[in-house]
Amino acid sequence: MSRRVRAYLAEDDDVWFQLALLAAEYSAVNLGLGFPDFAPPDFVKEAFCKALNGGAMMHQYTRSTGQRSLVKSLAKFFSRMTGREIDPLEDVVVTVGAYHALFCAFQALVDEGDEVIIVEPFFDCYQSMAHLCGGKSVNVPLRPKAGGCANRSGDWVLDPEELESKFTSRTKAIVINNPNNPLGKVYTREELQMIADLCIKYEAICISDEVYEWLTYDGVQHVRIATLPGMWERTVTIGSAGKSFSATGWKVGWAISPGNITKLLKAVQQISISECATAAQEAVAQGFEREYEVFGTPESYFLQLPALLKNKRDKLASTLEQLGLKPILPQGGYFIIVDISCFNVELGDSGTENDPYDLRFVKWLIKEKGLSAIPVSLFYSRDHKKDFDKYIRLCFIKEDSTLEAAQDILKRFNP
Ligand SMILES: Cc1ncc(COP(=O)(O)O)c(C=O)c1O
C-alpha cells in the first residue's frame, strides 16, 4: 500500500459512511447528505434523453478533456459572467464532477512539501487531496465576528492578520469555497480582495470552489475571485453541473483557468480518467445553451432554484428559531447550520468520549429521533474540531414533504 494512502486511511475514520449507514438503518428523514431529493428540470432531462437517442457517437468516447459542445457552451456562458473571453479549447477542462476538478487541481499544482492554505470550515476532501500529493494543509478558520451576534453566515469572517501569518515561501495555493459548504457564507468583494492581495503578494494560486455559485439569497451577490484585478492569471475556478442543474448523479464538473494552468489539470484529467461520459456532457452543454438564452429572465433555472430554496431555507430557519435554537442563516448554498449547545439531552452510548460532541449528538438524533444531519466538526481539521463541535448541518434542498417530516420531528423536541 502506498505511504500516502496508508496515511489517509489512518486519518480517516469514515464518519460520512458510518452516518449514511446509520441513517439507512433507522430509516431517518434525510437532511444529511447534500443532494436534492427531486428531479432536475425538464429541459436538462429532455436534453439527456435527446443525447441518448442522438446517434452512435453519443455512446462512444469523446474529446478527452471535454466534449466540444460542452467546453464551448461553458466558455460562452462564463465569458459573459466574467467579462473576459474564455477560450473553450485552452481554458476549460471537463471532469467527473467538481470533485474530480479539485483532484486534478491539487495533483497538477501541489508538490511534495508545498503548503496549501485551506479556509475552515472546508469541504472535507480538500485536506485529503492536499495530503495525497505530499502537500501540507495549513488551516485558517472563519470565526464569528468578535462582540457581535453571529446569526448570519456573513458574520463569520477571516482575520486578515491571521490569514497573512499562514502565507510562507512554501505556500503554493489557497482554497476557498464560495458560497461555503456548510456555513453558507458568500464572500464580499472586499473579503475577496483581501485574499486576492495576499495571493498576489505571495505568488500563490487560488483554487476557488464555486459549485453553489447560483444559490445566493436576499440579494447577496456572488463575486468570482477570478474577476478581481490580477486574479485571472492565478485562479482555478471550479463548477458543478450536479449543483447547477440539481443532477448530482450525472457527475459532470469543470475547471476554468488560463491555458497555461488548465494544461496541467488536463494532464491529470487524462492520466486519471481519460474522458467523461459523452451523453451527460452533451445534456449539460444543452442546459447551458438554454440558460444562456434565458439568463436574467424568470425562465432561468439559475434564478428559479434560489427562489425555491430561499422559501425552504426560511421555513426551516423559522422552525428552528421557534424552538429557541440559533440557526446561522446562510447567504448561499443549500445548507443551514444550527447551534445545538442549548439542547440538553442525554446522549447515552452514541459514540465514545473522544468523539466530538456534534458527532455524538447526530448519532443520537438519528437513532432516537429518526432525523439525519451532519456534524459540523467534520468540516474542520483535527486541531480545530473541538472548537467547532456544537453545530450540526441540515440540508434544505429537499421536497417540502421531507422538510415537513423533519420539522415535525424537530417540533417534538423540547430543547
Ligand atoms: C463545496 C463542494 N465542492 C465540490 C462538491 C462536489 O461536487 P460534484 O458533485 O460536482 O463532484 C461538493 C459536493 O457536495 C461540494 O459541496
Image: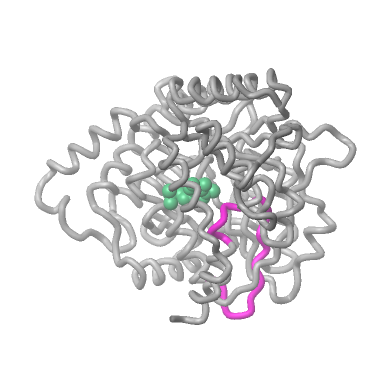
The residue drawn where x is 81% and y is 52% is 159
- Left or right: 158, with 308 as reference point: right
Which residue occupies the extreme front position in the image?
A: 348
* Residue 6 point in image, percent of width and height: 51, 76
Q: Which is nearer the eye, 90 or 127?
A: 127
Q: Is residue 223 visible?
A: no
Residue 359 is one of the magenta-drawn residues: no
Establish if 399 lies above or below 50.
Answer: above
Residue at 68% over, 68% down = 203
Can residue 283 be seen in the rendering of this structure? yes
Residue at 66% in and 72% down: 115
Residue 5 vertical placement versus 236 (above, below): below
Residue 350's x, y, as percent? 60, 46
Which span of residues is magenta-colored? 109-126
Q: Identify the residue at the far right of this view.
A: 147
Q: Position of residue 319 (x, y in %)?
A: 62, 20
Q: Residue at x 64, y 31 (%)?
A: 220
Residues 210 and 100: in front is 100
